[in-house]
Amino acid sequence: MILIDKLAYSSRLRRKSPALKTVFSVSSLLLCVAARSLPVSVCILSVMSVLTVKAGGIPPRRYGKLMAVPLGFLILSTVAVVFHLSAEPSALFSLPLGARYLSADSASLLYGLRLVLTAFASISCLYFLSLTTPLTDIFAVLRRAHCPELILELMFLVYRFLFVLLETGSAIQTSQRCRLGNRDKRTALHAAGLLLAVLLQLAFSRSSGIYDAMESRCYDGRIRVLSRTCRATAGETAAAALLLALFAAAAGFGRFYGGAL
Amino acid sequence: MNTDIIIRAERLCYRYEDGTNALNGMDLSVRRGEKLAVMGANGSGKSTFFLCLNGVHRPFSGTVYLDGRPLDYSKKGLLALRRRIGIVFQDPDQQLFSADVFGEISFGPLNLGLDEEAARRRVEDVIRELNIAEFQDKPVHFLSGGQKKRVAIADILVMRPDVMILDEPTAALDPKHARLVDSIIDGLSENGMTVILSTHDVNRALSWADSVALFDNGKVLIKDTPEAVFQNEPLLRRASRETPAVIRLFGVLTEKELLPAGLPVPRSERQLEKYLREV
């Protein structure tokens, strides 16, 4: 999570309008899932990857690794879709299992491929957003989209204090290690228990401290903050619209040339 | 009533829920535009006293006066009070609640009821003034300690209070950032702001302050000019403070008649050096 956060802050697309990036990524995602077609998925996957890596300047290896995270899960679920048990052997692949056959045919293979690519393309849409747009910018978009105030404030505070807690936790862990707290499994378990207990206590005392500090700045129960606005230029908006049109055209193309794709 | 007094605390007592008596009848007056250094051991009541001044803590007995009027603890009164008295907390992680620097600084002005445009202008001004622009786009959790401290000061400065309280602002900073923060503080009183600074650095207190208050066990031992306070050895010892080296040296040099009698007490090494060069 910290890695994604760091990458987002260093992306070259960071200063582009967060609203445009969000709209672009979410509409591509919806299009991709709704169309479920090979041309659309291939289009979206390549455009999003190029945008994130080339335009955003995320190191390609990092991107590859991040994309590989859901790979195992995807492969497992695809296997279940591609292969099925049937009474008759199929032309493409069959493995006799007693009286039945574990088989795959070209239709199920295509189905599996389409599924994998759709999933990957959807993930690439989400990575495009999360690797170019820091969470604080997304908060601003959500606020403009009239997301409920309470949820936003919670997200806002959780996000910041996640890092404070992580920092405190790792400092405590280091100090435990220095005193051989992780010598063997027994002490490690004991140390982890202490760590959690202390973190809980700290969380409480911190929250009251923060409340005092906010009160001192005239906190009246509503968190209002400004964000630096980055408006989309006409060119950027046009480019995003053009790309979305391309994805839609790919969907039309897929439909026109038969359901096979 | 002396209109020159902006804050007056009279016999303040405050006890925490766990039974610790943090303030035991504290009396202190602060003049308008004064540079007051507050010194005392950890747990001598400095932070508690500050939170009493802006109404976050309400003393069990005793009264705080602002401009001669007792504090008004109604919701409206507290807002008006905190608009005038700002506190920069010792631990920036306790104060900074937003992950975004610009958003963080804008919290105060928006709470003052400014419209977005005016708030935005103020935030931009203070970012320029404190040279925050170079890291304003970084998230708060990637900032260094010194950078966080500058943002914490900006948080309060942007609200343009009459009184600014800084709780050990240079604790845990490296010398470079400590100097930077010190120079920011020097700038504050030039604009007529009343500044209350808690510090453990006797040399800093001696050279900067108009007056020094020694806290001990929830009481004020003495509040006087830095020269007077730092020559009062018994009280210094009670508050576990050392006499600044400059004053000790100056004492010896005048005693041995190496320096002419009647010179004003030097407030910095540099001043003492100047005396010696002129002999």
Image: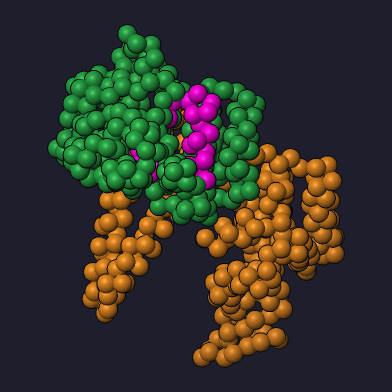
Chain colours: A orange, B green
Q: Residue at x 68, y 64 (%)?
A: A58
Vertical comparison of A210 with A89: above or below: above
- Decide: is A64 above or below B133: below
Q: Is residue B225 above or below residue B1?
A: below
Q: Is residue B12 above or below residue A138?
A: above
Name the image quarter holding residue A73: bottom right
**Magenta highlight on residue B181:** yes
The residue nearer to you, when weighing B214 against A182, is B214
Q: What range of the chain is rendered magenta?
A: B180-206
Question: Residue sitting at 53 percent across and 22 percent down?
Answer: B113
Taking the view exactly as shown, the residue that stands out farthest to the left is B19
Give whichever of B49, B120 is nearer the camera: B49
User: For this view, does A120 lie left or right of residue B264?
Assistant: right
- Residue at the outermost top position: B1
Residue that appears at 27% across and 51% down: A201
The image position of residue B215, as x and y in percent, is 24, 35
User: Is B219 a magenta residue?
Assistant: no
Which picture quadrant has residue A34?
Answer: bottom right
Closer to the camera, A120 or A238? A238
In this rendered view, identify the residue nearer to me: B199 or A253: B199
The C terminus of chain B appears in which quarter of the rendering? top left
Q: Quadrant of the N terminus of chain B?
A: top left
Using the rendered image of the protein, determine whether residue A213 is visible from the camera's viewpoint: no
